[in-house]
Image (cartoon, rainbow, N blue to C red):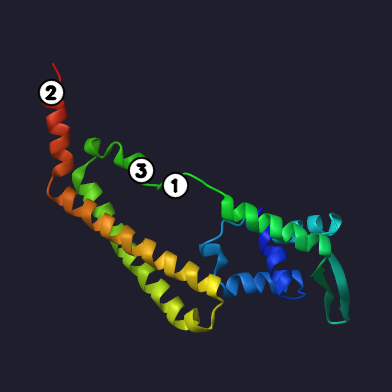
Amino acid sequence: MAMNLVILGLLMEGDKHPYEMQQVMQERHMEHYIKLAKGSLYYAVEKLLKQEQIAVREVVKDQSRPDKTIYYITEKGKGTFQELLKKQFKAETNYYHPMYTALAFIHLGDSEMISRILKDRIEHTKFQLEMLERVYQFYGDGAPHGSVSIMKNAHELCKVELAWLEKLHSDALDGLFENNRKIKNEQRP
């Protein structure tokens, strides 16, 4: 569903060849905030073409390069775009952080290893935060409002993630997860 929405949305902005779509997706760093299967663009374009959601505007022939097929969105595709947009806005999901499973058993882990891993994650998250700030400084003012909203949300989530990781690291250094293990073991008969 996401790839179809992206393709139809890009064609709502103007006629494009699939390679141009891919370039815009890269320029907007969509791979960082939209779950897209690599290599699925051309397959999705063909499928949308068969469903008459998009159509061929023209085929540009150049003897030095392969033919370049330019697509446009049809009226049917515009309706589908609106439906997909509505579904995506209404979509709900549970959020499962990749660390949640490990945190459920942190009291059983090696505290030095956990401390090192948390420190590494903190450094990586700081790097991500810096990258988000650079992307916003570069694109922020000229980007569409929806893209600015994405950047701001990603930035705020990254700041919250950093604070959470720093608290976990502090708790690990203070031995709080080990104490939890000792307390549980002492309570057993």
**Residue 103 appears at what percent x and percent y?**
30, 42
Q: Is 78 or 54 nearer to us in this picture?
A: 78
Q: Residues within 10 Å of mark 3 (few under 14, many from 20)?
A: few
Q: Considering the image in quadrants, where does the C terminus appear?
A: top left
Task: Identify the element where label 3 is drawn.
Answer: helix
Can residue 155 be seen in this snapshot? yes
Which comes before the other along the chain, label 3 or label 2? 3
- Tell me the residue at 67%/60% (across/down): 5
- Tell me the residue at 60%/57% (across/down): 36
Residue 100: which disc?
3
Task: Identify the element where label 2 is drawn.
Answer: helix
Q: Quadrant of residue 23?
A: bottom right
Callout 1 amino acid: Tyr
- Tell me the residue at 43%/70% (across/down): 152
In the image: residue 101, left or right of residue 143: left
In the image: residue 110, left or right of residue 37: left
Callout 3 amino acid: Tyr
Q: Is 10 or 58 nearer to us in this picture?
A: 10
Q: Could you give the CA–CA distance between mark 1 and mark 2, rounded to whole angstroms?
A: 33 Å
**Residue 10 appears at what percent x and percent y?**
69, 70
**Residue 154 appears at what percent x and percent y?**
43, 65
Residue 95: which disc?
1
Front of the two marks 1 and 3: 1
